[in-house]
Image (cartoon, rainbow, N blue to C red):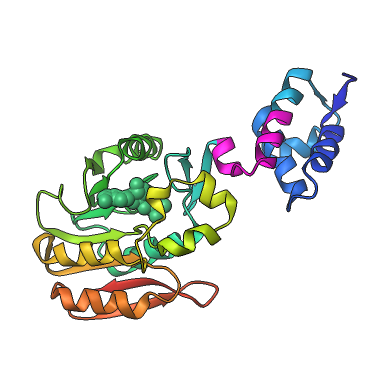
Amino acid sequence: MNKLTIREALQRASSFMEPLEDTRFLAELFLRHVLGLTRTELFTRIHDEVTPTQWEKIEELLSQRKKGIPAQYLLGEQEFYGLPFRVNPSVLIPRPETEILVEEVLKRLNTEAPLKGADIGTGSGAIAVTLAAHSKWQIYAVDIAQESLDTAQENSRLNGVAEQLTFLKGDLLSPIPEKLDFLVSNPPYIPSQDILGLDVQVRVHEPMRALDGGTDGLDFYRRICAGLPQVLKPGGLVAFEIGIGQAAEVQELLLQSGAVQSTEAIRDLAGIERIIIGS
Ligand SMILES: C[S@@+](CC[C@H](N)C(=O)[O-])C[C@H]1O[C@@H](n2cnc3c(N)ncnc32)[C@H](O)[C@@H]1O
């Protein structure tokens, strides 16, 4: 192969990705990853050479992405609430909407108090790790899948909050050993019949156990709400992420549980009711 500079590699990588969306962005991302450069370094060293081995690695990433594998899984990382998270196909890629849940919980509770809480269906640990990083809380991070818990544990170390988290493998609330000040969850909430309509990137490459919420998408909220009185202290707070059009039913389930007295729906940037708070 002829010698290639960073500038030429960027151009070649961008055209390789066409007609995918954001070709230039992805080309930059993959080059930076393989060359180990920040964005500024990439552009100040635009005339540096890319070795054949480096280009091979870049090409491999590009062809995997072309097959629909999310860039986050290829790079093994995703930022969430300004913190770095390792991701792999055993965990859902943390989404920006979920940052609203974190924000709302941090706003409502005393971050300096030694509160105890749980994150049900922790996946990458995005919610539990971020809450711990911004508070003095102790948090149980629960998931049904050991691979998810391993990833969440790695993320807790990466972000220096391992001491504040306890990882429990099990079904929803069943492993929780004591009463809590708060409970948060972003459970699987896609109605089963809508799964086929999801983007192939999500449907084929992200874990099905993180997506399928049963016939109407509400199975997990029903089961969590039914167990709330056993795990939530009086006056405790609950925060759920929900899917489109699920607000009224989830609020009703929360109130019926008797564990909370009032509920509130918070909208995301698209104006969709996305987070339900019960207190
Ligand atoms: C939508 S993902 C959320 C992941 C992460 N909390 C986030 O917000 O990015 C749902 C998670 O629930 C877990 N899960 C599914 N069924 C479960 C169950 N019965 N008990 C505990 N966790 C479960 C999945 O493994 C997955 O990690």
Residue shown at the point (86%, 25%) measured from the top left: 4
Find residue 201 and report its horizontal and vertical position in percent: 58, 49
The quarter of the picture where the N terminus appears is top right
Residue 168 lies in quadrant: top left
Q: Residue at x 73, y 18 (%)?
A: 53
Quadrant for residue 235, please give it: bottom left
In the picture as drawn, the residue positioned furthest to the right comes out as 2
Left or right of 146? Residue 44 is right
- Examine the rendering and report whether any part of residue 260 can be seen: no
Height in image: 31 above or below 238? above
Query: Of helix, strand and loop, which mostly describes the magenta segment?
Result: helix
Q: Residue at x 88, y 21 (%)?
A: 3
Viewer-closest of 10 and 147: 147
Q: Residue at x 29, y 38 (%)?
A: 162
Question: Is residue 101 visible from the viewing direction of this image?
Answer: yes
Image label count: 0
Residue 215: x and y in percent read 36, 65
Relative height, residue 175 to residue 100 (above, below): above
In what quadrant of the picture does the C terminus appear? bottom left
Q: Which residues are magenta?
A: 58-75
Residue 251 vertical position relative to residue 170 in the rendered view, above or below: below
Residue 165 sits in quarter = top left
Across and down, in percent, residue 179 comes to 10, 57
